[in-house]
Image (tube, rainbow, N blue to C red):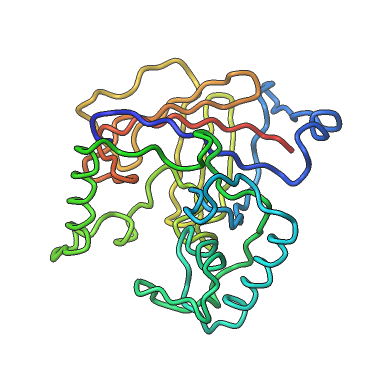
Amino acid sequence: MRGGACVITVLVLASVPLEARAQTWTVPRTADGQPDLQGVWLIHTATPLERPKALEGRSTLTDEEVAEFRRRAARLFGTGDSDFAVGDGVFQAVLANPEKYTNVNATHGATDMIDLEFDNRTSLIVEPQDGRVPALTPDGRTRQTATNAALRQAEKPPDVGNALRCISWGVPRLGGRYGSGDMAYYQIVQSPGHVVLFMEAGHEARVIPIDTSAHLSSAIRQWNGDSRGHWEGNTLVVDTTNFSRDSYFMGSTENLHLVERFTRTA
């Protein structure tokens, strides 16, 4: 990933069908006429980023399967006997349905987790249609394996990584590193020339200029990169470059080029 580009599409929908929303709801506007994205938002979906191998070829679950998954989640994580599940671990645990969920990296139990919402989707990724991040090139896979091994064997604090040191959880935050809990809350604030994305965990604020200015000089690198935004209809498009060599997202570091699209649907 370090030298290339990868495009995936992540879809998060409200429970009301898109057609119904289009007929009964219109996007509100700010005082300066821009689509209003402001508010405090909660992401508490249990749907995994990638479709599990066991559900290969299936983009949706039946209503009966969703009900069963909810019963399993209540049994595994409702009593506090299991370990804290990280990221897609909740869905994977419910899919595997063990007697008790264990996580060797957990530092506490499941009592600190908030309830996650199960729906019919089997992945947040909808493009490619297999619901999975495209495969790395052989060179990219080698670099990713080496980086992950170095993080596990780190002997000095700086080598552990920004997330484990609670310095920065980076961008993008897809669903929350902890699946939900303190990584799940976001606040969006708008002004005529800026949009601010404020994350509760780490109290990090991304201040994004909404203009046509160029990115910072390539010599200036930041953990969360340098973001520039513009509107395409009702969609806020945020283009981020200039990541630091200490940044890390699924194998990408300083050459990550991130494009995010934010559209309010309800």
Which quarter of the picture shows residue 29?
top right
Q: At x 49% / y 58%, what residue is drawn?
A: 88
Which quarter of the picture shows residue 245?
top left
Q: At x 60% / y 83%, what residue is drawn?
A: 79
Residue farthest top in this picture: 212
The quadrant of the image that shows the N terminus is top left
**Residue 132 percent location from the top left of the image:** 46, 43
| Residue nearest the viewer, comparing 243 with 134 | 134
Residue farthest left in this picture: 155
**Residue 83 percent location from the top left of the image:** 46, 77
**Residue 196 percent location from the top left of the image:** 52, 38
| Residue nearest the viewer, comparing 189 with 117 | 117
**Residue 90 percent location from the top left of the image:** 53, 64
38 sits left or right of 102 in the view: right
Q: Does 67 sit above or below residue 48? A: below
Q: Does 198 sit above or below residue 194? A: below
| Residue nearest the viewer, comparing 195 with 183 | 183
Q: At x 37% / y 31%, what residue is drawn?
A: 6
